[in-house]
Image (cartoon, helix red, strand yellow):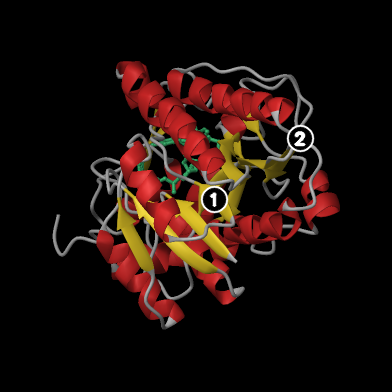
Amino acid sequence: MTILVTGGAGYIGSHTTILLIEAGYDVIIFDNFSNASKESIKRVEKIVGQNITLIEGDIRNKTDLEKVFENYSIDAVIHFAGLKAVGESVEKPLTYYDNNIYGTIVLCETMAKYNCKSIVFSSSATVYGDPHTTPIKEDFPLSATNPYGRSKLFIEEMLRDLHLSDNTWNIVLLRYFNPVGAHSSATIGEAPQGIPNNLMPFIAQTAVGKRACLSVFGDDYDTHDGTGVRDYIHVMDLADGHVKALNIIKKLSEVMTINLGTGVGYSVLDMVKAFEKASKKEVPYCIAPRRAGDIAKCFADPTYAKEILGWEAQKGLEQMCEDSWRWQSNNPNGYKEED
Ligand code: NAD
Ligand code: UFG
């Protein structure tokens, strides 16, 4: 089976590509490199010991996409391509709607034209907004507090409408919680451009000496130590969720919406402590004001994923921190030679 992986050069896409190839799938990566480097694919090729078909193109460009479907017989698409920085989405909402929503429309139109109607979509726990309680189940109310989140919510709705209009589509919506960690080879990992927005890369860059100190955004939340609680999930576990989703995708009669999380919440200070232990480095921090739009607690009820996919997270916090540290310390500037 041939899988088109949009955004396959990015953080989650590159890790998923490894498991897809190991599971025997043929993979075609399609990426515009707006937030990735070709080096990530070279390294994936080394890990899997084979060349990977890589097509540079933009999902908003019909001609780019049609060429792929003309040249290859694609059985299913895993759709990672998208912009993901919450703060940037507030400043540039149209850019986010254009890239994420319009891009998905062009992708689905092209898929339909070539009769490829199986898609796994990268959604996010952000679609739960500020949940009334935790752990979060898939049937909780949905809302969004920023254009990035709204783009995910709209795409989910759009894909549901698509299925209503034509039930030969097979659609899986995977709602990721907080992906962290890296492949055990420490040759690929998360490589944010500029100052990281997310906690784990910021901690890792602080431990390696690239940042002076971590700002902990708020210590007065209603959590066990006052700092924000999230469900951190190892990126290889997340990648495995996609392989498991492909195993069932052709048998679906309904749109499947599935949380991918561990079911365990850790606070910012829990993460700092665990990272210090794994790296044997100090992570200096100071308490800063709350970040606008943040919520106190967000963690998954992953029961449905186990039931429907036979998937559950295998890697714990220690391994997440060890793997993040190994990647960061071996590649202090990510995929670049120097910063
Ligand atoms: P990433 O930025 O590392 O990967 C996204 C990839 O898509 C990049 O390689 C980028 O170059 C590519 N891309 C973006 N726009 C494109 C376009 N128009 N055409 C072609 N390629 C394009 O991000 P990631 O962390 O790997 O996330 C993958 C997906 O998962 C995204 O859709 C993201 O919104 C979603 N997600 C991520 C997180 C997270 O915390 N990392 C959480 C929930 C959901
Ligand atoms: N945090 C800090 N300091 C930092 C960065 C983060 O204290 O420098 C705190 C945040 O306040 C929050 C926690 O660390 O309590 C996690 O923050 P992240 O930015 O790493 O992650 P979020 O949960 O805010 O959001 C992430 C992605 C979203 C995605 C969501 C759910 O950025 O796009 O996970 O998957 F939707």
Q: Position of residue 79 (x, y in %)?
A: 51, 45
State ligand 1's quadrant. top left
Q: Is residue 112 left or right of residue 98?
A: right
Is ligand 2 within 8 Å of the beta carbon of the residue shown at mark 2?
A: no
Of the two numbered discs 2 and 1 on the same chain, state the one appearing first in sequence: 1
Near mark 1 (Cα within 10 A), the count class, few <14, some 14-19 or many ≥20, is many
Task: Give the residue at x 68% y 38%.
Answer: 299
Q: Which quadrant is the C terminus positioned in?
A: bottom left
Residue 87 to residue 298: above or below: above
Nearest to the observer: residue 258 or residue 51: 51
**What element does badge 1 sit on?**
strand
Q: Give the residue type that dot 2 points to.
A: Pro
Dot 2: what SS? Answer: loop
Percent coordinates x, y for residue 20 in the rendering: 56, 67
Q: Amino acid at mark 1?
A: Ile
Judging by the rendered image, the residue that carries numbered circle 2 is 135
Q: Quadrant of the N terminus?
A: bottom right
Q: Position of residue 145 (x, y in %)?
A: 52, 16
